[in-house]
């Protein structure tokens, strides 16, 4: 309730801001300036060059070739494979990272003994250096590794985890192991902010705990759900680091990601293809983020009007 | 009866949580345990995986595997046969290169964390307090930029470093990282939760903009600043791609890169180095775990 009031008040104040004092204007612009200048110099301006590369034949002649680069990249089988794999991985990893973390958070939100110890343990993977995670995953999922050894007790034949279609799931496991903890912490914080009166009222009215979760808690923490989704999306791209250290420049099919493609184009000095691929990826991301923001706005309003 | 059932359910949940916790902890524990094993034990345990298959021919002309003895199977042991600090002494005393790389990691990561968070603190305050169409557009651009994998910004990074003449120096990594929009996005989220009544109250008390920022906003976001700093630190502490592309001189590479290059013969060392490398993040964690949970601390206890 208090939140709704706060929001309305903020809206009223927004109208006030129409006439800002000069010192406020100075703050508004001045505080943002260092960051914007840095972003312009190091990301945006050079990105214009990337756009130029994507529409020209090579970095020396720079003849305009229209969408030729896009045609050739989009019809390139390596690019297609990479785009497909990246999409599949993110489509699996992000929802799982959100849903499982939420499940863990709900679990720890009950009166369970040793809550803070559990929290620390679930966060611990964040501290392990990437290179050591990779080392451990090799020990576990190598053809002669511990997992196969363990499975052989049950008479399961050895599986070459990293060089078969299973490789995606091996990395998915790594991703979840690494990221669930922090996501869970964010959900726990959000859950603890759900007003207890609301939950109590619902319980008094006879709603079961599952129903209260879906009708009250989940809606209340929806901004956090979106936030965790965005973070998980970023992290699902960062998994390239582990994949690269685990399998090198040319992994088995299922793990050949867009980042591999771009890395290899960079090493071949094919800036045209690299820029085109980067531009395509940026475009897709802009659309995805736009959609996520739209959803967030919808949901935010939903709670506001209650 | 009902109580009995709920107790049973709770017990079941606890066991489930316990199993999950064990699975989460196991890799970390293995790393630590392995770092206390002797090189021989490591190569015996993991020979089937990291063994190079090298053989040695002795004086009699017999060939045997280069490693002294090797188990036929991989061996995950939770207790070393013999606790040894051999790996640690090698890393810390006998080979200065490791300490040098550790130092490289520190001088790359620390400035990035400090300046990224500092610049982001100002920017996010501006984003959170003063809104407008242009601001929203810029913020959206930041979010899109933040989501780009490193490989997308790889060419821009490389080009700018080249223009500025900082290629192959540490600045090529530090400067772009300082302006990475990640902390701006995170901090804006927290800054937006500062109740405007606090700011109004400060204004009524005659506080100027700078005072509102330093005396109201920053203290309220102290936890958020710390938790963002931890996240940024962990991210850059583990960087691999940037040094490989922007620093051709491997002398300057951080330990995170070097650790991934430790070859099969030195697996034992790798574990000890990993444990040493984990110390700074662990210290940061211990110091600020509660901040990670919820970035913002309202003295007034306002929630939501």
Image: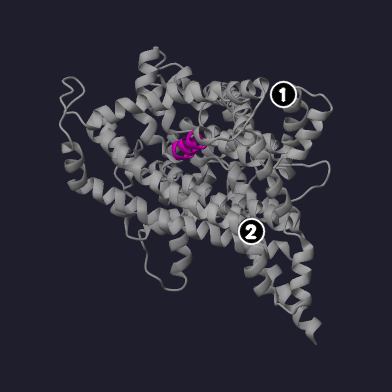
Q: Which mark is residue A303?
A: 2
* Residue B65 falls within the magenta-colored stretch: no
Asked whether, in this view, residue A256 is left or right of residue B289, the answer is left
Secondary structure mostly seen in magenta is helix
- Secondary structure found at label 1: helix
Residue A183, image x, y percentages: 59, 52
Asked whether, in this view, residue A245 is left or right of residue A263, the answer is right
- Secondary structure found at label 2: helix
Asked whether, in this view, residue A303 is left or right of residue A292, the answer is right
* 10 Å crowding of disc 2: few (<14), some (14-19), many (20+): some
Q: Quadrant of residue A212?
A: bottom right
Which is nearer the eye, B255 or B171?
Answer: B171
Locate the N terminus of chain B and report the quarter of the image it occupies.
bottom right
Residue positioned most to the top: B165
Q: Magenta residues, as a range?
A: B136-146
Which is nearer the eye, B221 or A83?
Answer: B221
- Tag 1–tag 2 contact (CB < 8 Å): no
**Count of marks overlaid on the render:** 2
Residue under label 1, please give it.
B209
Residue B113, image x, y percentages: 60, 28
Q: Residue at x 59, y 41 (%)?
A: B35
Chain to which mark 1 belongs: B
């Amino acid at each position: 309730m208090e939140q709704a009031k706060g929001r309305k008040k903020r809206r009223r104040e927004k109208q006030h801001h129409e006439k800002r004092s000069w010192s406020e204007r100075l703050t508004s612009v001045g505080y943002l300036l260092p960051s914007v200048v840095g972003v312009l110099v190091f990301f945006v301006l050079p990105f214009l060059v990337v756009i130029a590369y994507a529409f020209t034949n090579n970095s020396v002649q720079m003849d305009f070739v229209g969408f030729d680069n896009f045609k050739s990249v989009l019809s390139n089988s390596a690019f297609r494979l990479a785009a497909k794999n990246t999409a599949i991985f993110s489509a699996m990893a992000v929802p799982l990272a959100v849903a499982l973390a939420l499940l863990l958070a709900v679990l720890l939100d009950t009166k369970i003994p040793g809550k803070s110890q559990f929290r620390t343990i679930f966060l611990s993977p964040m501290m392990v250096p990437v290179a050591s995670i990779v080392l451990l995953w090799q020990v576990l999922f190598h053809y002669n590794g511990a997992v196969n050894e363990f499975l052989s007790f049950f008479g399961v034949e050895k599986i070459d985890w990293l060089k078969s279609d299973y490789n995606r799931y091996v990395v998915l496991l790594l991703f979840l192991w690494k990221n669930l903890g922090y996501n869970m912490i964010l959900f726990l914080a959000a859950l603890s902010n759900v007003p207890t009166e609301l939950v109590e009222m619902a319980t008094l009215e006879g709603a079961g705990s599952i129903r209260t979760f879906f009708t009250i808690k989940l809606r209340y923490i929806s901004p956090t759900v979106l936030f965790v989704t965005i973070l998980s999306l970023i992290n699902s791209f960062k998994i390239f680091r582990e994949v690269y250290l685990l399998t090198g420049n040319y992994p088995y099919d299922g793990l050949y990601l867009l980042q591999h493609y771009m890395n290899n184009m960079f090493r071949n000095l094919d800036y045209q293809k690299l820029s085109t691929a980067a531009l395509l990826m940026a475009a897709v991301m802009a659309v995805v983020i736009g959609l996520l923001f739209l959803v967030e706005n919808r949901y935010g309003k939903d709670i506001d009007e209650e | 009866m009902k109580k009995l059932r709920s107790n049973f359910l709770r017990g079941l949940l606890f066991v489930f949580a316990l199993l999950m916790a064990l699975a989460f902890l196991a890799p970390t524990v293995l790393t630590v345990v392995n770092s206390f094993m002797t090189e021989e034990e490591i190569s015996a345990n993991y020979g089937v995986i990291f063994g190079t298959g090298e053989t040695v021919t002795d004086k009699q002309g017999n060939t045997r595997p280069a490693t002294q003895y090797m188990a036929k199977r991989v061996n995950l042991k939770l207790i070393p046969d013999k606790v040894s600090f051999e790996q640690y002494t090698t890393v810390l005393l006998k080979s200065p290169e490791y300490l040098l790389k550790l130092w490289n990691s520190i001088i790359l990561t620390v400035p990035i964390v400090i300046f990224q968070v500092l610049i982001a603190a100002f920017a996010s305050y501006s984003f959170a307090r003063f809104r407008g169409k242009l601001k929203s557009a810029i913020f959206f651009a930041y979010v899109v930029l933040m989501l780009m994998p490193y490989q997308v910004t790889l060419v821009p990074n490389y080009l700018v470093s080249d223009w500025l003449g900082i290629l192959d120096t540490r600045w090529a990594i530090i400067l772009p990282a300082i302006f990475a929009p990640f902390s701006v996005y995170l901090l804006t989220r927290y800054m937006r939760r500062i109740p405007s009544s606090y700011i109004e109250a400060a204004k009524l008390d005659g506080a100027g903009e700078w005072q509102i920022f330093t005396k109201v906003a920053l203290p309220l976001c102290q936890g958020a600043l710390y938790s963002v700093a931890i996240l940024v630190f962990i991210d850059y502490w583990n960087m691999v791609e940037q040094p490989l592309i922007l620093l051709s001189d491997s002398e300057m590479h951080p330990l995170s890169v070097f650790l991934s290059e430790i070859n099969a013969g030195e697996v034992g060392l790798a574990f000890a180095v990993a444990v040493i490398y984990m110390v700074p993040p662990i210290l940061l964690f211990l110091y600020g775990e509660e901040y990670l949970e919820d970035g913002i601390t309202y003295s007034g206890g306002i929630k939501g």
